[in-house]
Image (cartoon, helix red, strand yellow):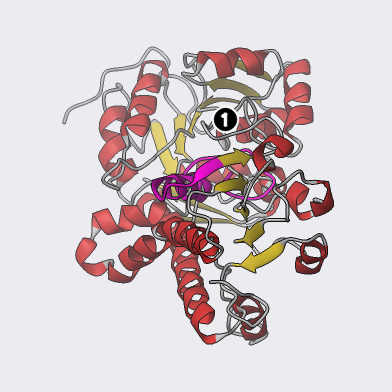
């Protein structure tokens, strides 16, 4: 292909340790990662196209919720190790942590990855390291990122190094898991992987395993797909248990005493940016061989409708035609503010399609982000015929049912997460029903 154009920075020693980082994407993964490096004494510049989020971060205000993030952000900015803007800057390392959602037809939308990669090309210098942290379909580095990076005047694998190191953390415990979890690093060359490993050793105490980029991409998608398939299995068991007089939560607990069994828990569906999305990457990649994966996705995607119909059946059993329902929880999991792919939203839509009036409340979701959302729990539950717990926030687990201003006599409560104390709610006069409970006390399926 000929000798590449000699870059003005070509004399730079490309084997030196990276000493400043530019993080593209300041969301649930990018911002914690950025401040983690900054708190470790590395100069970090964060970039996001969301101008409001950038302005908030610059003023040490959070646009996302995560335990320990506020104090770490304050420290990073106060000590001068973290700056932000809406455009990239020249750096030794670029970490891309932008969304990789699915389209309405469940195909991967990789435009954010492509645009983020293209945005850093003008700033690349010899020895630069580009790391993709976003969870993506296998071959994304090869097919989406590398074509953009080749538009620079640098030679891949010689003076431009590229790798994929997917995040493996859960909201609410991000900082703990960033430090302690093992990491997978896949490089386009062995040197790319080694450079990435050296960088993450800045704060990672877990083991860092090296491989190629496509294997690393597949590994992350496999991990989330395993969980999705396991949850689908649990949801099928929950439906079966309701027909044979068994409490599936108790049955799963007993089954998991077996040393080689780890059945996950059922629920109203699967949410979040990873588990509800990543399996579709494999279905799109190879639909003929992803039959179990595809079926699991369909099973979990059908759970919100199952929950809504169960609620409708409960109200019909006491001749309530167009009842009022209060949905407790909008986030996809407990004690976070993340609504991405939340099954709660789909439960609400299914309830409305069945002709029910719905109000909702979530103590972690601020600024009334959903049309049914109420500012207070009291507003959401007032005059409700049925409460549905869809998110197991600690606030809901600790809730005293006697304090609720609901319809009298006390309404039904449908617990889809096995998070509420049945005795406490029944003593308060509520009719308690649990998803996956067909035992004699779990009446009205």
Residue lying furthest front: 319
Q: Is residue 345 magenta?
A: yes
Quarter-of-image position of residue 303:
bottom left
Residue indicated by mark 1: 18
Q: Position of residue 120 (x, y in %)?
A: 40, 21
Q: Position of residue 142 (x, y in %)?
A: 29, 43
**In the image, what residue occupies the spot 67% across and 54% down?**
392
- Residue 104 shows in the view: yes
Q: Position of residue 112 (x, y in %)?
A: 37, 30
> Which residue is nearer to you in this view: 18 or 39?
39
> Which residue is nearer to you in this view: 277 or 41?
277
**Circle 1: element type:** loop
**In the image, what residue occupies the spot 61% across and 42% down?**
200
Q: Position of residue 179 (x, y in %)?
A: 69, 48
Q: Is residue 80 magenta?
A: no
- Quadrant containing the N terminus is top left
Residue lying furthest left: 1
Question: Bounds of the magenta span?
Answer: 331-358
31 versus 269 height, above or below: above
* Other residues around mark 1 within 10 Å, as few (<14) / some (14–19) / many (≥20): some
In the visual, does 203 lie left or right of 9? right
**In the image, what residue occupies the spot 22% across and 61% down?**
287
**In the image, what residue occupies the spot 74% across and 39% down?**
67
């Amino acid at each position: 292909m000929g000798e590449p154009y000699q870059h003005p920075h070509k004399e730079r020693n490309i084997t030196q340790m990276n000493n400043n980082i530019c993080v593209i994407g300041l969301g649930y993964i990018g911002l914690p990662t950025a401040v983690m490096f900054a708190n470790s004494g590395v100069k970090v510049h964060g970039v996001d196209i969301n101008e409001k989020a950038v302005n908030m971060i610059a003023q040490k205000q959070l646009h996302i919720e995560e335990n320990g993030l506020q104090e770490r952000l304050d420290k990073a900015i106060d000590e001068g190790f973290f700056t932000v803007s809406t455009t990239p800057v020249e750096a030794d390392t670029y970490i891309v942590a932008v969304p990789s959602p699915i389209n309405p037809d469940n195909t991967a939308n990789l435009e954010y990855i492509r645009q983020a990669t293209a945005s850093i090309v003008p700033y690349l210098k010899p020895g630069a390291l580009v790391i993709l942290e976003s969870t993506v379909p296998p071959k994304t580095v090869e097919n989406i990122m590398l074509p953009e990076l080749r538009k620079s005047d640098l030679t891949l694998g010689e003076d431009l190094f590229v790798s994929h190191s997917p995040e493996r953390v859960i909201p609410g415990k991000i900082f703990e898991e960033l430090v302690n979890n093992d990491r997978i690093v896949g490089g386009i060359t062995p040197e790319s992987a080694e450079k990435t490993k050296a960088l993450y050793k800045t704060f990672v105490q877990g083991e860092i395993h090296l491989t190629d980029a496509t294997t690393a991409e597949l590994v992350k998608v496999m991990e989330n797909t395993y969980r999705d398939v396991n949850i689908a299995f649990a949801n099928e068991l929950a439906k079966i248990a309701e027909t044979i007089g068994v409490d599936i939560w108790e049955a799963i607990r007993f089954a998991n005493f077996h040393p080689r069994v780890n059945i996950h828990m059922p629920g109203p569906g699967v949410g979040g940016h990873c588990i509800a999305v990543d399996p579709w990457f494999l279905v799109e990649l190879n639909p003929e061989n992803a039959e179990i994966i595809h079926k699991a996705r369909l099973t979990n995607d059908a759970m919100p409708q199952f929950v809504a119909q169960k609620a409708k059946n409960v109200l019909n059993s006491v001749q309530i035609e167009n009842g009022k329902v209060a949905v407790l929880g909008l986030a996809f999991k407990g004690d976070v503010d993340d609504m991405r792919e939340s099954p709660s939203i789909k439960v609400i839509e299914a309830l409305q399609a069945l002709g029910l009036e719905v109000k909702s409340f979530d103590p972690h979701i601020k600024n009334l982000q959903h049309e049914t959302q109420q500012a207070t729990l009291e507003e959401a539950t007032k005059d409700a015929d049925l409460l549905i717990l869809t998110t197991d926030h600690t606030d809901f687990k600790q809730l005293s049912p006697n304090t609720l201003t609901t319809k009298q006599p006390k309404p039904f409560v449908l617990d889809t997460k096995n998070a509420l104390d049945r005795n406490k709610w029944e003593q308060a006069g509520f009719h308690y029903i649990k998803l996956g409970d067909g035992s004699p006390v779990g009446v009205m399926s």
